[in-house]
Image: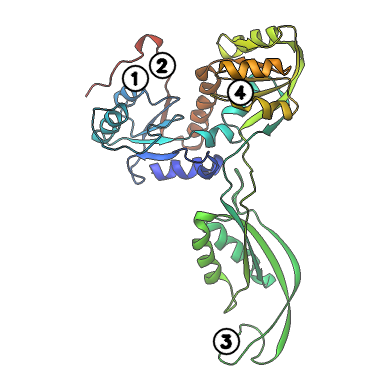
Amino acid sequence: MVTVASVLEWINRIAPWRSAYEGDPVGLQVGSKDSPVRKALVSLDRSDSAASRAAEIGAELWVTHHPLFFRPLARLSPDTEEGRLALFLAQRGMSLVSAHTNWDAARGGVNDTLAELLGLRDVRAFGPSGPSNESKLVVFVPEANVEGLIDALAAAGCGEIGLYRRCAFFGAGTGTFQALEGSNPTVGQVGRVEKLPEIRLEMLVPNERLERAIGALRHAHPYEEPAYDVIPLGDRKPWPIGRIGQLTEPLRLEDLARLANRVLGTRCSTWGSSDRAVRRLAVVGGSGDDLWQDAQRAGADALLTGEVRQHHGLSASESGFALLSAGHYATENPGTRRLCELLADRFPEVEWEFFEPDPGEGGRPVEW
């Protein structure tokens, strides 16, 4: 049976929680990991109308892009919007999971979906990312024990890169040691210098799983005292949030706005000369106007994002760069729909529904 934990684990594989911006409260926000899931709703926002729809269909799980809680609550009561929705969910035994900036940055996520809709080619990532919070675990092991050790470390959470697991690198070398009195060497004799062929095995490990991984290493390794290194990768930034790519043909800024209006169902505002030719376009769904200089340095002629503040629009246009504001909803909802489709493919035994808000129902409170 699918549980909330099953869904959490799978989202973590395609959009690791640790890739979210620092302080972004992604993951399980309300409910229990052990709760079964037979029906589920996915929506961009944690709105009253979406909550009412989740209750109407009898959903046990509600997955949102924008989190319910962005900061700790001082109290849990219906006096606040967050408290009211949390109590609404708790009383119905419904869990809420949010995939926010981790899904913005993920392969196939919000910004890849946006780039695809706009027909960009040769797409690559740019801009800031969340902290890696990873280390490289390096261990030396006899060749006969390599596969078993990889299996044990993979089960402990090592070697996960995007949609791939059990990722490892190994190469041959020679190890040497001298066992002292009181030791119990697996190979060789006490007091004698030994030289043995060994394999150097390397795997990535999230720092929060490091203790568990080292325990698995010690348990699975044949040596009494295995040699291993932990190499912090604190400066490694593997999840840039933005995307930049080549348009199929150069477009004037005003024509690019028309294209975005058509494919996203929105009305773009622009900053910059309407005749400016745009060949390389950067995209950041939601609030991404503060990344315009990153986009410019990455070689883009323009940046399309959800909202553009006046001072960013002015600064960008004066520097010869162009900005397009296509709306927060229009730039992030397609990627949220993509997440629902992926969840439905992965968990076909669950009835998944994607929630599209009715503009006329905005502000309708949940019915207790």
Secondary element at image label 3: loop
Q: CA distance from mark 1 to mark 3?
A: 66 Å
Q: Are marks 4 and 1 in contact (CB under 8 Å)?
A: no
Secondary element at image label 1: helix
Amino acid carrying label 1: it is: Ser
Q: Mark 1 highlights which residue?
A: 49
Label ID, residue 254: none
The residue at the point 57 percent across, 45 percent down is 131
Q: Are marks 2 and 1 in contact (CB under 8 Å)?
A: yes
Q: Badge 1 local density, few (<14 within 10 Å), some, or many (20+)?
A: many
Q: Mark 4 highlights which residue?
A: 114
Q: CA distance from mark 2 to mark 3?
A: 67 Å
Amino acid carrying label 4: it is: Leu
Q: Is residue 67 left or right of residue 297?
A: left
Residue in the foreground of this view, choosing between 63 and 47: 47
- Sequence order check, earlier mark of 3 and 4: 4
- Sequence order check, earlier mark of 2 and 1: 1
Label ID, residue 357: 2
Residue 2 seen anywhere in this rendered image of the structure? no
